[in-house]
Amino acid sequence: MTELLKIKNLKKQFGSKVIFDEVNVSVEKGEVISVIGPSGAGKSTFLRAINMLDTPTDGTVSFEGNELTKLSEKKLDTLREKMGMVFQNFNLFPNLSVLENIKLAPLKVKNISKQDATKIAENLLAQVGLTDKGSVYPDSLSGGQQQRVAIARALAMSPDVLLFDEPTSALDPEMVGEVLAVMKQLADDGMTMIVVTHEMGFAREVADTIWFMADGGIQEISTPEEFFEHPKTTRAQEFLEKVL
C-alpha cells in the first residue's frame, strides 16, 4: 500500500500546557482511521495540526512526500486542496445556495468553467442524497442535510484524504445516521479518511484502524476488533467502560 501521510514526533503546546506530544503515526492510501478518546484529549487540535490549520510546536507532518511543516504558505495552500476538511459546525456560507456553496472552491481555486463546476456539484448532491436541494439556502436545511452538503463541498476539490472533526456531534440523534451512511459509502469507495468521532458504532464497523488518544498522546493503535474486544491499556479499558 502507498503511504499517504506520515506524522513524526508531533507536539502541540499552548503556553505551558502540552496538548499532545510524541505522536508517531502513518496513514495508507484508502485507509479509514477513527480517532477516539475522552473529551479534552486534543483530538480536534491534532486533526487541525495535520493540515497545519494549527501549527505544531514540534515534529513533522509529511503528506504525499511533502513535509508540510517546512513549506511556504503558498505551497501549503496548494497541498491543502488535496486534504478536504469537514467541520463540526458545517461552516456553509448562508448567503449562497447549496449548489453555489459546493461550486465555489472549484471555480475560485481550480478555475474550472461554471458549466463543469455545476455538473460536479449536481453529481455530488446526488451522491449525498440531496439532488432536490441545490437551489435552496443552508438555513432551510436540517443539521444532517447541512453536514451532507459540507461533505459534498469537501469532495468537490477531489481530495486525496478527508479529515472529519466530530462531524455528527452538533446533530440531533435522528440525523446522525444519514451523515454516517454517506461517510460509510465514501469508505466503501476507497476514500482515505481520518475521523475524530464519538460514534463508537461507526469506529467499530467502518474504521480499519483505531487511534486512541488520551493524556497527551496516542495511547493505543489497533484494529477495531482488537481495541473494542481486548484494549491493551488501562486508560482504554476505563474509557470503553464509560462509553459502551
Image (spheres, helix red, strand yellow):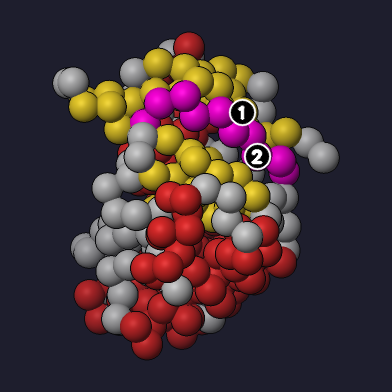
* Whether residue 125 is situated above or below residue 163 in the rendered picture: below
Viewer-proximal residue, 13 or 75?
13
Mark 2 or mark 1, which is nearer the start of the sequence? 1
Q: Amino acid at mark 1?
A: Lys
Q: Which segment did they paint magenta?
A: 20-29
Q: Quadrant of residue 27?
A: top right
Where is 117 relative to 63, above or below? below
Name the quadrant containing residue 17: top left
- Local SS, label 2: strand
What mark, if any, has residue 6 been given in the picture? 1
The residues tagged by marks 1 and 2 sit, at their Cα atoms, a distance apart of 7 Å
Residue 230 visible to the viewer = yes
Mark 2 residue type: Val
Could you say where residue 173 lies in the image, as x and y percent from the top left?
Answer: 34, 83
Residue projecting furthest to the left: 15
- Relative height, residue 106 to residue 118 (above, below): above
> Which residue lies at the image location 44% right of the left edge and 45% below the top edge?
213
Q: Is residue 69 above or below residue 4?
A: above
Give percent across and percent down for residue 134.
42, 75
Classify residue 238 as left or right of residue 9.
Answer: left
Q: Main secondary structure of the magenta part?
A: strand
Pick out the residue farthest to the front: 234
The N terminus sits in image quarter: top right
Contact, CB < 8 Å: mark 1 with mark 2? yes
Q: Position of residue 115 (x, y in %)?
A: 55, 59
Label 1: which secondary element:
strand
Q: Position of residue 105 (x, y in %)?
A: 44, 47
Q: Is residue 28 left or right of residue 233?
A: right
What residue is rendered at 41% in x and 59% in y? 238
Residue designated by label 2: 27
In depth, the one of 206 and 48 nearer the eye is: 206
Residue at the spot 63% in from the left edge and 60% down from the top edge: 230
